[in-house]
Amino acid sequence: TGGRRMTEHGISQMELQRCLSALLSDSEQLAAQGDRMTNQDQLQYLMENVACDHTFMDAMQTHQATQLVTAGLTVEEVNGVAAELCRHIAYFGKEGEPMPSSVVACAPSGVDVTADAVVRALEDAAAQDVAASEETVVPPTLVPADKLASMVAERKPSLSDADDTGGMGVVCKKLDNGVKVNYRTCQSESQRAHLRVTVPCGRAAEKGFAEGSMAVGARAMQDGGAMLGWTREQVELFCVDHLVVAEIACNEEFLFLEFVFPTNKVSNEPDDVSGMEGVFQVVHGLIADFKWEEDALERAKQAFVQTHEQVSKSLEAAAAEHLLDGMCGGDARYLSIPGEKVEALTLDQVRSAVTSRLTTDNIELSVSGDFDPSELERLVTSYIGTIPATSRGGDRAPESIPGPLPGAVRDLFLRVPDSDERAVAYVAGTAPNRWGFLASGEQALDTQPLKAPNPAKRLLAEFSGGGGGGRGGGR
């Protein structure tokens, strides 16, 4: 149906403009990084051009050529090429139309799929009437300037004085609502930056909540996106237009909100914001005004059900699961989530689990990239500092897991049917979690304080063989 719609209706002028803006911005960034490409990347680029009989150009020449080509590109030309590319599937079975060279269908065992059934499905799809896609109005900014000014005037956010830590160039600050901020300028990638929001919790914090609620809730945020009065589609297209790549994930110890983005302005529209400001608008919306949606939760559930089914069929995953089950005393927080537990989760349960930890006193925001520090601090103060202060409250010590297994049951064996005769072995042991807590609840640095003034330099010296420490090896 999508191919038929593209063939008959194509894309709109607005969609083409968005694609061209993103293409030119991406090309501009590649041109800015041209003199920093590694020899390996340059060689691969050269070999690809030779293999495709293309003209080899440096990054700036490529950008200039891209500008020349896109300047005269029309929506009619694009739709004409798209229609030709899709004709073999859009008009499948019609006399005189091109046919696919082959049709490949893949189905799980037990499902009977015949060639006739596949052909009938393609013919039925080609016979359906399709309408043009509805135009989605993409906002140039998620937070209008007057609303931002009003929030700043009302809450008067502020950043603490800078603290340059350990001679590594990392600046650490703290907003008056409790959010901790770290940043470091790095010009290895021109006009690019990476932002990570770290929330200490993860699946380890699911005790007291429904099993799997933290992990599934994080995935529901990833599959959702409605915020600040905008729909999920509008926010997604806003991110696409500003070349923002976002990922929300949850592991055993942390909830992550990660963003890779351009620090410059992507388009020439006067009301448009830069990629960096766009990211801070998204972060503001995720923390302060995120809309939880049932359809996003259903998509998240489907993903986790499939993941759990795959664990038992993978030699590596099944062995790791068996090992964790033994080490953690069957603690469900560290194992894959059974399908029936996933299906039983409600929107209120996952929302309650995630928002209980997504409080300003429990959030750390870190940024590294090619940006102006003063501009970054302005955006942090305006968008993150205006989030109302919230607190977790209660005991902050994480729930621990049982200690090591008795010696007699430490060697675990599991047989998993596999297509080849092979084996996998894991060796594991106890260690403090990344929060620094041991299984007893004590903090690791309280029992074994670091003696070196700069642990990073000491570790670097040991691993390089210059610190007098031993080096381990393995297979």
Image: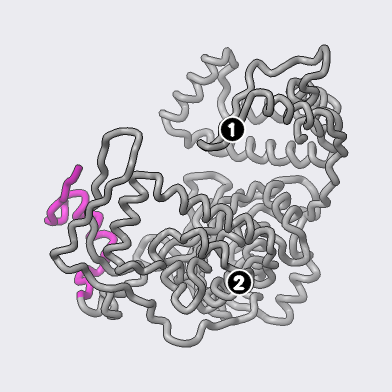
Q: Which quadrant does the N terminus fall into? A: top right
What kind of secondary structure does the magenta stretch mostly adopt?
Answer: loop
Residue under pointer 1? 112
**Rendered position, 330 above or below 465:** below
* Mark 1 crowd level (few <14, some 14–19, many ≥20, 10 Å Cα): few
* Image position, residue 148 (x, y; %): 74, 70
**Residues under labels 2 and 1: Cα distance?**
40 Å
**Colouring of the image:** one colour
Q: Position of residue 63 (x, y in %)?
A: 65, 30
Q: Position of residue 466 (x, y in %)?
A: 16, 52
> Was residue 449 drawn as part of the magenta stretch in this picture?
yes
Q: Residue 249: where, in percent of width, then height?
A: 51, 59
Residues marked 2 and 1 touching at CB (< 8 Å): no
Residue visible at 63% across and 39% down? 26
Query: In the rendered structure, which disc, 2 or 1, sits on the residue that comes first in sequence?
Result: 1
In this image, 380 relative to 317: left or right? right
Q: Secondary structure at mark 2?
A: helix
Nearer mark to the viewer, of 2 and 1: 1
The quadrant of the rendering that contains the C terminus is: top left
Amino acid on which the number 1 mark rests in the picture: Asp
Residue numbers of the magenta segment: 448-475
Tell which of 170 and 52 is nearer to you. Answer: 52
Callout 2 amino acid: Arg
Using the rendered view, name the quadrant where residue 405 is placed.
Answer: bottom left
The residue identified by callout 2 is: 351
User: In the image, is 132 to the left or to the right of 320?
Assistant: right
Magenta-colored stretch includes residue 232: no
* For residue 320, above or below residue 73: below
Q: Is residue 96 visible?
A: yes
